[in-house]
Image (cartoon, rainbow, N blue to C red):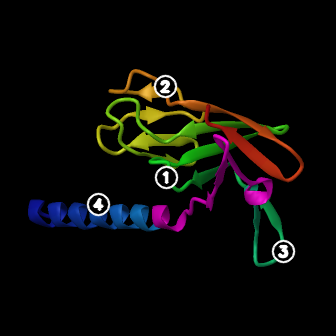
Amino acid sequence: MNRKEFIQTCGVSCLGFAGISMALTGCASLYSVQGTVTDKTISFPKDSFVEIKKSGKKLPRRVVVVNVDNLKFPVAVYDNGNDKYTALWLKCSHQGNEVSVHGDLLSCSAHGSEYDTLGKVIKGPAKEDLRKFNVRSNETTLYIELA
């Protein structure tokens, strides 16, 4: 194989891997739910953390993104098990852009800041953690306390 053929083969391979990577990422879905605000508290159904497959099988969700009218950024809520939850406002602490949820990684596409599921900075330029909210629950509903 000469140099030109080698470069062409490598280029095609790289494009193929990039395409497959993007296709697989596009298959992953992030579940979001519309929350309701009453007296500075967002509420949404606790069963949002259960995914029901076509077969009827129930699978747990680790994270749910809660959208609320009149709240500029959504809130990511992580199920930590044993009825414990972490709620994070998806506003980057660096320059206020929206943070995206990628499973157990939260990232800001504007400047590359990354956070863990507790909202702690794991990669800058952000220096401050994401804003956290207290979460309480009853049998059927989760409540995110904004104040």
Tell me if residue 79 is in the magenta stretch. Answer: no
Residue drawn 47% across the image and 66% down it? 26
Tell me the residue that label 4 is attached to.
Answer: 14
Tell me the residue that label 3 is attached to.
Answer: 56
Whole-number angstrom distance, CA of label 4 to CA of label 1: 43 Å
Percent across and percent down for residue 129 are 49, 25
**Which tag is nearer the camera, tag 2 or tag 3?**
2
Q: Which of disc 4 and disc 3 is earlier in sequence?
A: 4
Name the secondary structure under disc 4: helix
Is residue 60 visible to us here? no
Q: Which of disc 1 and disc 4 is earlier in sequence?
A: 4
Which is nearer the eye, 100 or 54?
100
What amino acid is labelled 2 in the image? Asp
Residue drawn 25% across the image and 67% down it? 12
Q: Is residue 126 left or right of residue 143?
A: left
Q: Which of disc 1 and disc 3 is earlier in sequence?
A: 3
Tell me the residue that label 1 is attached to.
Answer: 70
Tell me the residue that label 2 is attached to.
Answer: 129
Whole-number angstrom distance, CA of label 3 to CA of label 4: 39 Å
